[in-house]
Amino acid sequence: MPDPVPSSRIVVDVRAVEKNFGEGANRIHVLKQVHLQARTGEILMLVGPSGCGKTTLLSAIAGTLKIESGEINVFGNQLEKMSGGALTRFRAKNIGFIFQQFNLIPTLTVAENVGVPLLIQGVSSGKALKRSREILERVGLGERWKERPNKLSGGQQQRVAIARALVHEPPLVICDEPTAALDAQNGEIVLDLFRQVARSPDRAVIIVTHDNRIFTYADRIARMDDGEIVEVREQDQNHTPHFEHEHAL
């Protein structure tokens, strides 16, 4: 049985958010009056067909994409009102972002890649390396810490990217298809780690996914279609999450 969800509070509040791409006849209305909330102590999964706006919404919540209108409040900070420098500092401290493309630095070792968020915050290289190796152990890559990313498989690189997003213990973890490159065994390791992170009373996890193997790990599932949130469903927590071996997208 999973641990009970602790008392939660709203830490991400998306209100009437609009986002367009292109101009004139080529303008595409990607987000349409989107409302969504994420709470501490939970895993919120954002699902829906390709092209419906999930990744765009995720990028807006992470503060890496500007919106046309609406409000995005994260831990009491209204992102669209923050200056560029303040937003960058806020993201570095409070948000761990797991990208689809991994975005690892090829000239750095695995441990050095993982330690980058700590170095940005001024942590010494020795302490950053120690913490990096600890989190790499948790994702099953403790023995590969000296390797360069090009020596790893796609699934291993994804786990390095996940370790990098978690190493500085950010209160908000945002994940874009984090299990797409993982087999069942490693997917289960990663999802169990996300669940441990989400069970902290001060943290929240938002996951965009097409991977229905992981739906049972969610506390809530928000379904998007054509730029809108069309349903938010609470999950029954009286079950044991299980990472199915069949991969259906």
Image: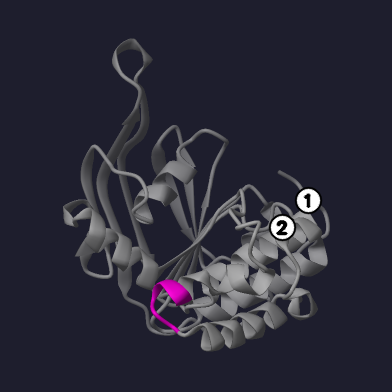
**Amino acid type assigned to the residue bearing label 2 in the image:** Arg
Residue 196, above or below 117? below
Question: Label 2: how many residues lie within 10 Å, few (<14), some (14-19) or many (20+)?
Answer: many
Q: Element at badge 1?
A: loop
**Residue 90: which quarter of the image?**
bottom left
Going 21% across and 45% down the picture, which residue do you hit? 70
Going 23% across and 63% down the picture, which residue do you hit? 86
Residue 247, numbered label = 1
Going 42% across and 77% down the picture, which residue do you hit? 203
Which residues are drawn in magenta?
A: 119-123
Query: Does residue 85 appear in the picture of this structure?
Result: yes
Image side of residue 93 versus residue 165, left or right: left
Q: Percent from the top left, x then y, of residue 30?
A: 39, 32
Asked if the magenta segment contains residue 122, the reply would be: yes
Q: Percent from the top left, x then y, of residue 139?
A: 70, 75
**Amino acid type assigned to the residue bearing label 1 in the image:** His
Residue situated in front as seen by the camera: 132 or 28? 132
